[in-house]
Amino acid sequence: MFDDESTDPLARWLAPPEAGLSAGLRADLRERTSREVGRQAVRRRWRQRGRAALALGIAACLGGLAVYLSVPPEVRIREVERVVTVEVVREVIREVPPETAPVVLAENPDELERAALFKDPPQAAVLWCKAGDIRFGDDGDVAGALRCYRAFLSLADAEQQRPRAGDNWLLTSLKQERRSGP
């Protein structure tokens, strides 16, 4: 619009400063500007976090409201129509002395071993021997039978540790080894 810079009213504002800024003024201006920009960035981040937290809270409230409204009213409110009283009866169980307690003989060696853990030594010895017989004879599990027979011999009395005619070769050899000593 203006051909001559001297007649242009904005030429004075757009031209570079004549004397320039001093070093101290330039450093002060840079420090204030960077501090203000830094504060604005921090404020902006906190505002964004606040908005995100507010949006999350509103979403949670709306979700809870949606769940509450989706349940039919008859399910929401229940009235107790009757009160049931229960009488607690305690029954004292008399323990059977170990001498007269029956020995449980099952055909599963795992059950026999578990039962042997809770019996007295004479009854447990019988259960371990029975479990070893089942493992050795029916299952062919020599390692399991060996474990059961060793537990049997550790609990057995002197009469049970003597070899008998009905014992298998594994139990007989373990009994003889125990009698002869290590």
Image (cartoon, rainbow, N blue to C red):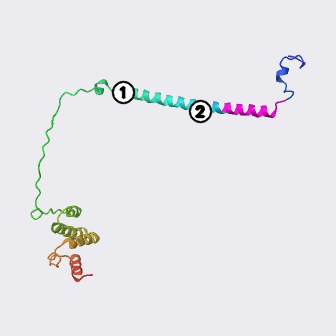
Helix, strand or loop under label 2: helix
Prevailing SS of the magenta stretch = helix
Q: Are marks 1 and 2 in contact (CB under 8 Å)?
A: no
Local SS, label 1 = helix
Q: Give the residue type that dot 1 points to.
A: Tyr
- In the image, 37 versus 60, the foreground residue is 37
Look at discs 1 and 2 and give the one toward the viewer. Answer: 2
Residue at position x 21%, y 76% in the image = 171
Name the residue nearer the viewer: 39 or 180: 39
Inter-mark Cα distance, 1 to 2: 35 Å
Instruction: Based on the picture, tell me whether residue 71 belongs to the magenta stretch.
Output: no
Residue 91 in percent (x, y) is at: 11, 48
Which residue in the structure is indicated by mark 2?
A: 45
The residue that label 1 is drawn on is: 68
Q: Which residues are magenta?
A: 20-37
Q: Quadrant of residue 45?
A: top right
